[in-house]
Image: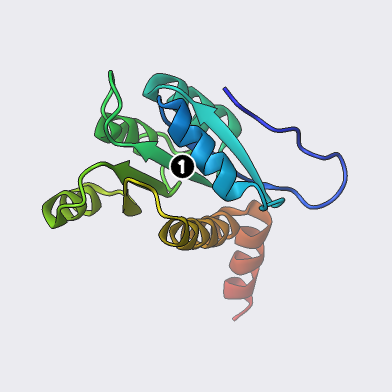
Amino acid sequence: MITRAIPKTGPRRCRLLYVEDHADSVALVETLLAGRKDLLLLHAADAKLGIKLARAKRPEAILINVDLAGMSALEFMKALRADPATEATPILALGASAAPEAIVKGLEAGFFQYLTKPLQSEPFMEALAFALEFAAVERSEQNPVLLRHRTTLKESR
């Protein structure tokens, strides 16, 4: 597992969990995110550890290699969707196949976005930005303080 220290001061950083068993791929994502001081990269080398980290650390977004050994990316996603704490977390799939059928199949399965290898900087950063924006909206809608405020507003009408 790779984690970088969270500063004790300053704004909270978003967490991206990358479930990947190839060190070169992890190094590439670290390089792409090196300038993003607002992000904390978490890494799991297999899907089982990824599930544990997702439940413990509650990342705003997850990137998973769809070609992992052991548990499939679909099983990984189903396990997280069955848990209320992680059911809405956007999961970005990263696959070796750029065939339109593979991309459509991944999206129909429920992945937030399907990216292809080799990972390209611009599409990855755009997909990540969209996933983080989605996560921020989703989490604000689940915020108990906001829920009470919305309920109060509805009752006063």
Quadrant housing residue 74: top left
Most extreme residue toward the right is: 9
From the image, which quarter does the C terminus lie in? bottom right
Q: Secondary structure at mark 1?
A: strand
Q: Position of residue 96 (x, y in %)?
A: 25, 41
Residue 154 horizontal side relative to residue 63, left or right = right
Q: Which is more toward the observer, 31 or 6?
A: 31
Residue sitting at 21 percent across and 53 percent down? 103
Q: Position of residue 117 (x, y in %)?
A: 32, 45
Q: Which is more toward the observer, 35 or 141?
A: 35
Q: How is the image coloured?
A: rainbow
Residue type at mark 1: give it: Ile
Residue 114 horizontal side relative to residue 33, left or right = left
Location of mark 1 (residue): 62
Quadrant housing residue 80: top left
Q: Position of residue 112 (x, y in %)?
A: 35, 53
Residue 115 horizontal side relative to residue 106, left or right = right
Quadrant housing residue 78: top left
